[in-house]
Image: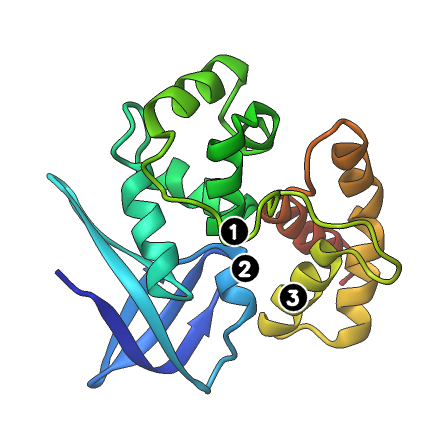
Amino acid sequence: MIAFVSGPVAALTPTLAVIEVGGVGMAVQCTPNTIAGLRTGEPARLATSLVVREDSLTLYGFADDDERQVFELLQTASGVGPRVAQAMLGVHSPDALRAAFASGDAKALTAVPGIGPKGAQKLLLELKGKLGAPAVVGAQRAPVASGPAPWTEQLTAALIGLGYASREAEDAVDAVTPQAEAAIAAGGSAPVPQLLRAALQSLNRAR
């Protein structure tokens, strides 16, 4: 098993980081939140999990060992593969997922693309207690406060990490704000992965 990769960041896309390790470029699948913390040309260390299939070897990368552990525990539930587990971590932090399972918050799980109400209830039954207790009770809900919403900061950082200027990133965030607000008004959270894709589309149209 490849426990981690460390080296300069050779390239970034919205879902992939290429880390140079001993002269070899390691392609690592990452969430937008993880991508947001990386910069091309700068050193990085990602905890990793290698998923082996008959026709592929895929390396998934995480900001820390806790994310990797949760990623692997999520896959112990029936019907949860690496892509769904990564999508869950793309929407919620490890502690937010722990809080959701501890409190039986199905709505938090349905905020993840591909998970419906029935699937959320099934996951709550299968995984309750397996992820451990959250460090902060209710961590899945960000407190209401003045200033930029956390999703705007994540999205802006991800776009800047992909090479866009600050002004371009801010304009793209403004363009997807109605989509984010609609998701929040519906009782969910801002889906950062989808918002990032929509923001990139708006930037491509503007160029």
> Which type of secondary structure does the marked residue at label 1 adopt?
loop
Q: Which mark is residue 159?
A: 3
Tell me what residue is drawn at x 48 percent, y 48 percent: 134
User: In the figure, residue 167 lies in which quadrant?
Assistant: bottom right
Q: Position of residue 88 (x, y in %)?
A: 47, 40
Vertical position of residue 123 compared to residue 147: above or below = above
**Disc on the earlier residue, 2 or 1:** 2
Pointers 3 and 2 in contact (CB under 8 A)?
A: no
Direction from residue 94 to residue 82 in the image, left or right: left
Q: Residue furthest right?
A: 146
Which mark's residue is nearer the viewer, 2 or 1? 1
- Amino acid tagged 3: Leu
Tell me what residue is drawn at x 20 percent, y 85 percent: 22
> Which type of secondary structure does the marked residue at label 3 adopt?
helix
- Label 2 crowd (10 A; few <14 / some 14-19 / many >=20): many
**Disc on the earlier residue, 3 or 1:** 1
Circle 2 sits on which residue?
33
Q: Position of residue 130 (x, y in %)?
A: 32, 37
User: Mark 3 to mark 2: distance in Å?
Assistant: 11 Å
Which is nearer the eye, 78 or 17? Answer: 78
Direction from residue 85 to residue 153 in the image, left or right: right
Image quadrant where one finds the C terminus:
bottom right
- Amino acid tagged 2: Asn
Which is nearer the eye, 199 or 154? Answer: 154
Q: Position of residue 188 (x, y in %)?
A: 69, 33
User: In the figure, residue 111 lies in which quadrant?
Assistant: top right
Vertical position of residue 136 compared to residue 35: above or below = above
User: Mark 3 to mark 1: distance in Å?
Assistant: 19 Å
Image quadrant where one finds the N terminus:
bottom left
User: In the figure, residue 179 lies in which quadrant?
Assistant: top right
- Amino acid tagged 1: Ser
